[in-house]
Amino acid sequence: CFVPDYELHYMQTKEGSEIDLIITRPGKQLLLIEIKSKDAVTEQDAKTIEILGKDFDEPTEKWLLSRDHLPQTFGTTKAMHWMDALKSFVAEAN
């Protein structure tokens, strides 16, 4: 069951940098998501979300989603396969 209190947002700076998805979850940290259509991600792919994540006044959780099956961490950003992230998100919401 999806939690209806979750809100979905997007952010783009004046310079054109963006966070693909921002999810507000009552009682949980703000979730920032960067989505890459790649089979392998690198630390460079997490650069924007790491930088923009510092601008939020509240604590954030950061995910980098892609087709890469290798779970990794870049700074404070968790990189994972998009399907694993979806399973985790749905499990957390129930």
Image (cartoon, helix red, strand yellow):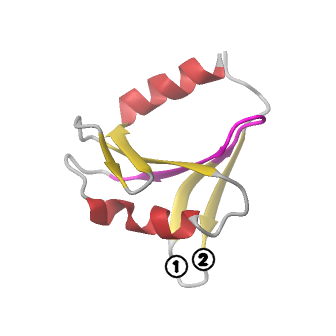
Q: Which amino acid does label 1 sit on?
A: Gly
* Residue 1 inside the magenta-drawn segment: no
Q: Few, some or many C-alpha atoms within 10 Å of disc 1 (few <14, some 14-19, many ≥20)?
A: few
Amino acid type at mark 2: Thr
Residue at the location (67% across, 15% down)?
1
Gap between marks 2 and 1 measured at Cα: 5 Å
The image shows residue 51 at horizontal and vertical percentages of: 49, 70
Is 15 rendered above or below residue 35? Answer: below
Mark 2: give few (<14), some (14-19) or many (20+) Cα within 10 Å: few
- Cβ–Cβ below 8 Å for labels 2 and 1? yes
Task: Read off the residue under disc 2.
Answer: 13
The span shown in magenta is 23-36
The part of the image, by quadrant, that contains residue 94 is: top right
> Which residue is label 1 attached to?
16
The residue shown at (48%, 62%) is: 49
Relative to 18, does residue 41 appear above or below in the rendering? above
Q: Where is residue 48 in the image (x, y as percent from the top left)?
A: 44, 68
* Picture coordinates of residue 89, whole percent (x, y): 54, 28
Q: In which quarter of the image is residue 58?
A: bottom right
Pick the front one: 20 or 70 = 70
- Seen in the picture, residue 38 relative to 53 is either above or below; the reply is above
